[in-house]
Image (tube, grey):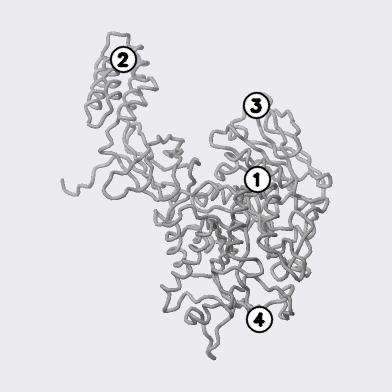
Amino acid sequence: MAGSTTEYRVIIEAVRPTVECGRFAAKAAAGQPLEVSADIFADGHDKLMAVVRHGPPPRGRAAPKRTEVALEPVGNDHWRGLIVPKAVGPWEFEVVGLPDVYGSWARDLRLRIEAGQDVTVELEDGAQIVDRQGSGDGLRAADRKALEGLAAALRSDASVSARLAAAAAPEALELMRRTADRSRATVAGPYRLFVDRPLATFSAWYEMFPRSEGAVPPRGGTFASAAQRLPAIADMGFDIVYLPPIHPIGTTFRKGPNNTLECLPGDVGSPWAIGSEEGGHTAVHPDLGSIADFDAFVERARGCGLEVALDFAVQCSPDHPWVREHPQWFRHRSDGTIRYAENPPKRYQDIYPVNFDTDDRDALFVALRDVMLYWIDHGVSVLRVDNPHTKHLTFWEWVIPELRARNPEVILLSEAFTRPRVMERLAKVGFTQSYTYFTWRNSKQELTEYLTELSQTEKVDWFRPNFWVNTPDILHEVLQHGGPPAFRLRMVLAALSCPSWGMYAGYELFENTPVRSGSEEYLDAEKYQLRPRDWARAGSLAPLISRVNRIRRRHCGAVSQLRTLRLHHVSNDALLCFSRSDDARSDVLLVVVNLDPVNVREGTTWIDLGALGVPDDRPFEAHDELTDTTYIWHGAANYVRLDPAAGQAAHVLHLRPR
């Protein structure tokens, strides 16, 4: 026939999760439900059926093993379903749509019977549909027998109503959908996923400088003394302890306290000025100990239930061995000197950036990859990457699959406080988690917009946020001026609105003094000097941190699902109300946070109970897991009051039937 095309009936569009039409892999986690959705429609009025098939990609000539899950229509030709990838590593899925011939017949049969029509011929038509399906190849013996029984029931001498009941029984409809001929179905895909381990999508991070733990200035701490801090970090409920660079530190242009250019004897310098005559990125600072001491630190962390994350900073001090051995890996000025890092007018004379435009790029790429593999071989399967947005995106697009091919469990956190499109691209090319703008989102409007963007747009398919309340570089003015109540509210907000969150040591002691007014840098910043602390000091935030992290773990199924986060109305612009729930809505948390660290705030909620699966016609319990207090609520409107002076940063309410 002139102008003929491939025959198809069903159209499949807007498949999710996908990243740039499948160029990059969307993100999933082993054992965690992942929502697959698509717009699926066809001409005419026939009912449709759709499934998603998923599994690891095929190897060699073997047919791929696929698990099939039904998609359900949710309105306006949009279909959704949940799959649960089982194994860490590459994965893929495809969406299959086809006319539901039997379902359409059963629907029309009911309508004809209800209209009082003679359906003798229609019942035989249905039996023949079943016959044809039962004669197909590849059917299981049990299914073939069930189909024969269904056809016999439609041809029996039973009443019309009895035969309709047999035809439309849920098990009959499911049988016919399961055994339907897929040969003329529309197939969209396959689409790529990368399945991470659960820690990649649900984690609590704690950043510490080993050289400060057990330090007695001018003598610094060691891996052995820092290991003594690990049980307390684990007791606070953290999963990952993150270490800044632990390598030898250069002496050329070494920075003094508070980033001063004057370095005196005994000044320890910045760990990010990596490399000296003692070694580079695969060496440890001799003051911290040996590589064997580091291995012992990692093993001690594991014994406490912690994983060690290590900073990977692609930069060198002027004393790094690479500067001497591979000068072509660095940019040179017109006078022949190597160009140091600058953010004009700021100068970082103690750091040389790497030149990714070098003609020796392949060797540079391999050397950087091998640094990461070295630490992975020493038990570090979590890497926090420093400023990845200032390195070529082509490098990350190449190296991340290289790392995953050797260790698919590796987790990469992108520390890219940069423009949204660059931050997003890093997530697309494969970074497991990403720092965010959370620190600078403090008002109700800012938080509402940001949480909605992260949880209710396509970003949820490939961007995994990590909410950090502070870092060694970032002390927001809210913490500088809000006192302990600000620390409480920001911690609760980060830990319960995001599946992953982190804090830098000293947060639990309410450290909040900036180097100067208007700056976000700490006074006496630990980046440039030793900072031993009295962890036994009274009034620590540690007990509340422990409690909140226990709540997170107890409700992991709800908190780990960012796409189920919902914002709810509350009648006060200083109160933020949001819910976390699992897909079945069997575990629901409602969190109300007072964003004002100074004043008592009160208001009335207006909760979307239907979205949470809570009946609106009977009372229910709202159990505050922070105070172990139970309230009896009824309906969407309920009164809340939070007093920061009394330590009430938030309500964390577990909603449950009464």
Q: What element carries label 2?
A: loop
Lower sequence index among marks 2 and 3: 2
The residue identified by callout 1 is: 496
Q: In this view, does 206 lie above or below 94?
A: below
First reached walking from the N terminus: tag 3 or tag 4: 4
Nearest to the observer: residue 632 or residue 341? 341
Residue positioned 72% across, 67% down in the render: 220
Q: Residues within 10 Å of mark 2 (few under 14, many from 20)?
A: few
Q: What residue type is labelled 4?
A: Phe
* Residue in front for this viewpoint, 537 or 585: 537
Q: Give the class, few, some or many, for how many residues have Cα within 10 Å of label 1's Cα (few <14, many ≥20).
A: many
> Does label 1 or label 3 sit earlier along the sequence?
1
Residue under pointer 4? 253
Disc 1 versus disc 2: distance between alpha carbons? 59 Å
Where residue 126 sits, quadrant-wise, is: top left
The residue that disc 3 covers is 657
Q: Nearer the viewer, mark 3 or mark 4?
A: 4
Q: Distance between the residues labelled 2 and 3?
A: 47 Å
Characterize the local packing of mark 4: few (<14), some (14-19) or many (20 or more) Cα atoms within 10 angstroms. some
Residue 450 in sight: no
**Which residue: 57% across, 60% down?**
384
Does the CB distance between marks 1 and 4 fall below 8 Å? Answer: no
Marks 2 and 4, the one that precedes in the sequence:
2
Residue 234 rendering spot, x and y as whole percentages: 67, 48
What's under tag 2, amino acid-wise?
Answer: Gln
Q: How far apart are labels 1 and 4 at the CA level?
A: 43 Å
Asked whether, in this view, residue 461 is left or right of residue 497, the answer is: left
Percent x, y for residue 242?
Answer: 62, 58
358 vs 288, left or right, is left
Upstream in sequence: badge 1 or badge 4: 4
User: What residue sits right under mark 2 in the picture?
Assistant: 117
